[in-house]
Amino acid sequence: MFNTKISQKIAFAVLFVSTLITIIPVLIIIAIIIKNGITAISWQFLTTAPSNGMRSGGIFPAIVGTFYLALGASAISLPLGILGGIYLSEYSKNNYFTRILKLGIVNLAGVPSIVYGLFGLSLFVISLKLGVSIVSGCLTLAIMSLPSIITATETAMSSVPRSFREVSLSLGATKWQTIRYAVLPHASPGIITGTLLSNARITGETAPILFTVAAFYLPQLPNSVFDQVMALPYHLYVISTQIPGISKSVTYGTALVLIVFTLSLNLFGIIVRTYLRRQKKW
Amino acid sequence: MSLIRAEKLNLYYGNFHALINVNLSIEEKRITAIIGPSGCGKSTLLRTFNRMNDLIETVHIDGSIIINNENIFSKTTDIDSLRRKVGMVFQRPNPFPLSVYENIAFGLKIHKIAKTRNELEHTVEQGLKSVLLWDQLKDKLKTSALNLTLEQAQRLCIARLIAVKPEILLMDEPCSALDPIATMHIEELMLELKKNYTIVIVTHNMQQAARVSDDTGFMLLGKLIEFNKAEKIFTNPDKKETEDYITGRYG
Ligand SMILES: Nc1ncnc2c1ncn2[C@@H]1O[C@H](COP(=O)(O)OP(=O)(O)OP(=O)(O)O)[C@@H](O)[C@H]1O
Ligand SMILES: [Mg+2]
């Protein structure tokens, strides 16, 4: 009796401490960024271009750039990734080809982001002559986020009970009607969260945009999708490594904006999921 | 004339021969029960009638099933309209995690049966009435079907099916998840539905087959051993295996 109680307490303590150890660094990082960056945040910081060799002024072009990139990349990756996931879960036969395809997707998710950056540079920027531009950047980011969107969609679709499909088919629905009306609505919370989380992740990436779209310094906003833009992650990298004597609050302020940007995408994903889960239960 | 006729039907799961030379003929507006010990192929046979076995990649079928004078395995058969005509009620009540209303409306929307909102509401009401659920649920149309009792859920599944206007209802042990009282209610409902539909029911429960069926088939190890009027099967079967089974010599 006594022993099992003690070991239960020890196990609980170990689990609790491990959780703390994983959470604490994150909290510390966020706290430091907020503490050092909050003073830089002002209306002017958010709405004007950098000036004085990027040592002062704001980060407006980088915010806009990141926003465009996130939007453009999603516009490409969402339809492709979701349709791909639906194909894998509902249409593909369990054969050699499919297994290779799935293995490929899993491995793509593990490819370092700099490799995607160089791939984008050679394919979109150079071979397809799209230049260092928003299109090239969006395509590169989209390709990078595809594996996780496909996987999220496939998982969400496969976790919808088989009986929903059987009932729908047995009522004379076609395969597509079954997918559309009996499976997708129940898979959508998982799909939406998965895609939002993956978008949040790519908006914070520097390597894929480094050679494909990001501008070192470009105070004006882009006129077309073939222009370069500044982007928050790259701007942060630039001002923290290339600009001597920049005030700490500017770098931390930029980091704070970037973190808020990605975290709010995450948070939005979680809220949407909670809302949809509450609607649909089985 | 028979509505469903199986001729020299053989079905294989990969190498496993699950239905062996089955011949039978099912009459219109009657209840036909298929009985037999576990694993003898009752569900498999039932699922050939609406080609649900097509969903299993390893299945291979020879022979023919003729429904309304049309071989359902012919290349020109439209599987979706076959399945609409030959509907199925499953063993576990399986409503969608949607409201009562949406469950019945599902098939109506798929087949565009009800054009206007009024028509839709009316058809949903008819569906619930036909399974005697309307009085219980008319104020709960918007609540989730997952909150229903098992009996209500099974009735709802039958209503969802009837709403798409099938001719044949296949029921695979529709009462096995229900308590005896609910079972009795569903049996009463089946007798009521017989007026308008042809029903084929698979059941483990011999008393149930004896109570509701007009014709009964006894299966054993993939073969249809005997098929006859229910009274004949349950009082004076021709085959020794049938007699052994109904007198309880198999599990
Ligand atoms: N998908 C499948 N793949 C391979 N074999 C199967 C498959 N489904 C069923 N079988 C086999 O076919 C035989 C008949 O199965 P079936 O489900 O039709 O039996 P049943 O009479 O309905 O049994 P129960 O009363 O337990 O429901 C069984 O031996 C079963 O193991
Ligand atoms: Mg069965």
Image (spheres, coloured by chain):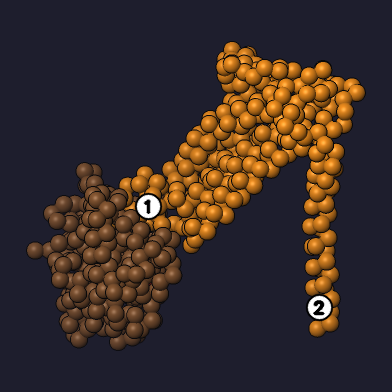
Chain colours: A orange, B brown
Please name the residue that numbered disc 1 is placed on. Answer: B55
Q: Quadrant of residue B143?
A: bottom left
Q: Quadrant of the C terminus of chain B?
A: bottom left
Instruction: Inspect this view and state whether residue B171 appears.
Output: no
Bin the neighbour count of mark 2 within 10 Å (Cα to Cα): few under 14, some 14-19, many 20 and up. Answer: few
Asked which secondary structure carries label 2, the reply is: helix
Q: Tell me what residue is drawn at x 18 percent, y 85 percent.
A: B236
Q: How many numbered discs sit on the rendered protein?
A: 2
Instruction: Say whether residue B17 is left or right of residue B126.
Output: right
Instruction: Inspect this view and state whether residue A161 appears.
Output: yes
Q: Nearer the viewer, mark 2 or mark 1?
A: 2
Q: Is mark 2 within 8 Å of ligand 1?
A: no
> Percent position (x, y) of residue B111?
26, 50
- Amino acid, disc 1: Leu
Q: Tell me what residue is drawn at x 9 percent, y 63 percent.
A: B1
Bin the neighbour count of mark 1 within 10 Å (Cα to Cα): few under 14, some 14-19, many 20 and up. Answer: few
Distance in Å between CA atoms under marks 2 and 1 = 51 Å
Q: Is residue B198 above or below residue A177?
A: below
Instruction: Say whether residue B164 is left or right of residue B196.
Output: right
Q: Tell me what residue is drawn at x 54 percent, y 45 percent.
A: A192
Q: Quadrant of residue B101?
A: bottom left
Tag 1 subunit:
B
Asked which secondary structure carries label 1, the reply is: helix
> Percent position (x, y) of residue A243?
86, 21
Instruction: Say whether residue B242 is left or right of residue A163.
Output: left
Please name the residue that numbered disc 2 is placed on. Answer: A5
Query: B100 or B149: which is nearer to us?
Result: B100
Residues at circles 2 and 1 in contact by the CB criterion of under 8 Å: no
Q: Are marks 2 and 1 on the same chain?
A: no
> Percent position (x, y) of residue A153?
53, 44
Q: Tell me what residue is drawn at x 80 percent, y 78 percent.
A: A4
Q: Is residue B17 above or below residue A158?
A: below
